[in-house]
Every structure is written in C-alpha cells, then in structure tokens.
Amino acid sequence: MSQTTAAPRRHVVAAVGEIPPGGRKLVEVAGRRVVVFNLDGEFFALGDRCPHQGGSLAAGCVTGHVSSPGPGEYSYSRRGEMVRCPWHYWEFDIRTGRSRFDPNRVRTRRYEARVEAGAALRDAVALPEGPYRAETFAVRVEDDYVVVDA
Amino acid sequence: MPAGLRAIDCDVHPMVPAMSALAPYLDEFWRDQVVERGITQLDSQSWPINAPKTIRADWRDEKGRGASTVSALQTQALEPFGADLAILNPLYGVQMVLNADMAVAFTRALNDWIRAEWLDRDPRLRASIVLPLQDIGAAVAEIERLAPDRRFVQALVLAMGDAPLGKREFWPVYEACVRHGLPLGVHAGSAYRHPQTSVGWTSWYLEEYVANQQAFQSQLASLITEGALGKFPGMKVVLLESGVTWLPAFLWRLGKTWKGVRFEVPWVDRAPAELVRDQVRLTVQPFDAPEDDPGAVQRILDHLRSEDMLLWASDWPHWQFDGDAAVPPGFPASTLPKLLRDNALATYDRLRGEEGSQ
C-alpha cells in the first residue's frame, strides 16, 4: 500500500462497549472508511472496501470458515470470523483481511486495532474526523477505548 | 502435416457397418435376440449417416457409408496425415439402449469388434473402452476386462448421458480409470435420456450439433463442482470434438462465480481454471475459430495460459476439413510438437514408452 508514507497515528474510534462481541462499527480514520470488528473481545480493523469493486464490508454477511477434506465433507470453523462482501460474496478473513479464494493476491487493507485505557489515551490521540464527527466523544480516564492505527 | 513430428491422432471413428458385424462378438442369446427382434442398426441420431459432417464425401463408399475397415483408415487418414498412432473412438449408438443388460452385451461386443477387427490389424492403432454407463458396475467390469490389453488407452462416454458426470455414482468408474492409467474421454453425442439442450428438444441437426458445446460446459462444471477432478487428481479428462474455443469464456464465468460462492463447494479449493489446466485436455478437430484471423489461435492459447492442453485429432471420417489440411490453420509452428505428439504422450499413460509397438 502506498497511500501514506507517514507513520500511522492512533485514532480512537469507539468506546469498547459500543462494539459488542460479534459486532462491528464503520468509522472514518485519516480520511478512510474502516470497519472495526469485535471477535470475542479482540478487535480487528479492515478497510471498508472490497478489493474487487469497492463494496462495503461493513454491510456484508459475517459467517464462518468452511473448508473440506473431500467432496461432501464440510469443516466449519471460526464461526463469525469471515466477512463476505455484499456485492459478489467474496470472503475475507476478518483477522487478516485476506480473501479466501486467493489469500496472497486478493486482500483488503488491514489496520492495527486494540483496546487502550482512557487514562493512557488522553491528550495523545487524534479524535475521529470527517462525516462521523457526530460520533466524536470525550475520552474518559475510567473507560476503555478501541484504537486504530492509520 | 509437418514432417518428422510423428503425429498422434487422438480421435478417429471406426463405424460399425451394421449390427450383423457385431454378431460374432455376442453370446448366443443376444446373437439370436438381434435377429429375432430385427435389430439391424444402432446408428445414432447424433451422427445421421447422410449428414454431410458424419462422413466426408470423398471418404464414403458406394453405399454412402464409410469408415468401416482398417484399410479405409489407413488410406484416408493414417497415411495421408502421417500419424504414428491413432486412438479409435467408436460412436455406435450403444449408449442409447435402455435395457441395461442389452446395452452391456452390445457394448462388450463393440469393444471386442474393435479389438479383433481394428487393433489386431494395425500396430499403430489404440482404442477407447466404450463404457456401458447404463450399469455402473458393468462399466467398471468392462474396464477391468479390457484394461490388461494396453492397446486400450482411454475410457469413453458421451457428452450427454443420464446424469452429470461429476455425480458420485460415477466415481467407481473414475477410480478404475485412475487405477489403470486411462483418461476419461468425453465425446460429443447424446444417449437421448434428456433433451439435447437445457431448454428442450431441438428441431434440427444443426441445433443439436452446436448444442454439444453446452453439454461439454455442463459436464466440465459438474466434474469440477462435484469434486470429481479434485477427488481423482490423477485422472485426465479428454473432451473430444468439443470445438475448444468456448473454453476460456466458460472458465472465466465459472471462476468468477466460484470466487463468490466457494463456500457452497468448499472441496473446490483451487480456481476452476487451474484444475482444468492440470486435468482437462481437448482435441482440436473441430477448432472453432475464424480462418481469416491469423492471430485467433494464439489468442486462444494465451487465454488458456497453456500450450499443454490441446491434442491433435483428424476426427476421421467426420468432415471437419478438406484434403490433407488436418491441422487447423493458425497454430504457430512452435506449438506443433506439443499439439501433434507431446501433449498426447503426456495425457495418455499407455502411449508412453511403447509408441508404435503392440
């Protein structure tokens, strides 16, 4: 990716309670649409743009990972960890952004996401920008927040 | 035909002159049944004898038939085209027979006729084992019966049969093919269990001949999506008389759609085009392309991303070309060694290491 050469900045995108396990939130950071997923308390952030034709992954079906040792056999695992683009159903691994059908060549951008304590964030982060400014909120020392590097 | 390439002709069609020719190869019961029931011919509607394509005009005998003797094959195809080996694919209508016991008896007789009256008479000849798919167990048994004779190099079915070829009911056949090093040949033609198109019965020969292309596409989609190609990675599938050039666009559509609904067929863990490049081969008579566009063939090869997939065939006695122009025009000279010989050797296990010997 060559969109930026500057070091990524931390962006507070949500209070932890806003994105429950299995949930997701579409945010805008550094001018880019990013969809943030909560997988059982771990947070992952993907560019909200399918590399095929730009469909919004935030609007896609979240599903599991199905593979097969042979015809007629379905190995279903990692429930809730794959997202399908709503336009042509391309599947992406929420943890890596890689497509299922061609993981090395077809992937959506992945951003670092994590939880940080409000006390550690105060005065140190960029606030959300852009059309989602309405969601701007004050960082409180006693709460935890989801932070995305972008 | 370029000199020195020792071509292998991967699709020629001996034609059974009449049921009476098979009589010596039937047991007494069926031999009498053929007479008592008045079964004189099994010519298939897929290849009407008088249709111009069925037998090239200068290859017809005084009765309008042809392709019924080894000497005809020798003088009309092997010698003028310089083939070193040729694979016999009989298209007599045994697949149309509804009575499975009769079908098995007739198919065995057809295979034995090929062995005795063709293979035994010219060491350059090889043949496909025609399969009686009316009874899967019998089809496997027919492979087992004939596979010890290594002049049988392939198993042969029609593009339009009872059910899509990827279905698991056919897998014992594929298991036997792999065990014996026999590719599965799929030839244009119908057993007439279903309309020749997915929208219904055709009215004309023209419509039906062209519809074979849809059948090949459906069979390829079935073999891939049912997981048959993946289950038997050692199996080659040879599409015979398919027309070839529909393939890239079809693979594009299949692959594009697979990317979105892969989860439906999770055993298809590679792009369909990759499976096809590894396991599917096609004979090049006919080769559907404009003759006045010298770049067309190269573009098709570019789209296929492979020069290993195509096998030369004359399709004798079908009328696909005039004179000795048995190689479709437009193939770059650099592709001919593979097209005419090397690809066939790579496809047919049983041709390797024993070319020209019995």
Image (cartoon, coloured by chain):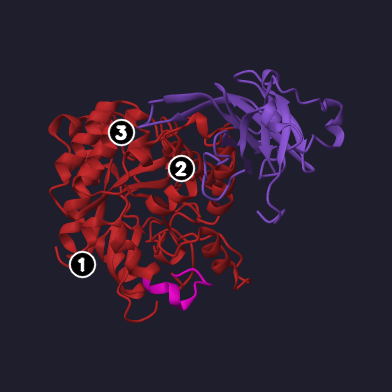
Chain colours: A purple, B red
The answer to whether any part of residue B36 appears in the image is: no
Would you identify the image quadrant in which residue B285 lies?
bottom left
Q: Residues within 10 Å of mark 2 (few under 14, many from 20)?
A: many
Residue B329 is inside the magenta segment: yes
In the picture of the structure, the residue carrying the numbered disc 1 is B355
- What's under tag 3, amino acid-wise? Trp
The answer to whether any part of residue B217 appears in the image is: yes
Q: Viewer-proximal residue, B307 or B237?
A: B307
Instruction: Return the disc, 1 or 2, that comes first in the chain's sequence.
Output: 2
In the picture of the structure, the residue carrying the numbered disc 3 is B171
- The magenta span reads B327-337
Chain label for disc 1: B
Residue B339 in the image: above or below residue A121: below
Q: CA distance from mark 1 to mark 2?
A: 30 Å
In the picture of the structure, the residue carrying the numbered disc 2 is B220
- Quadrant including the N terminus of chain B: bottom left
Q: Which mark is residue A40?
A: none
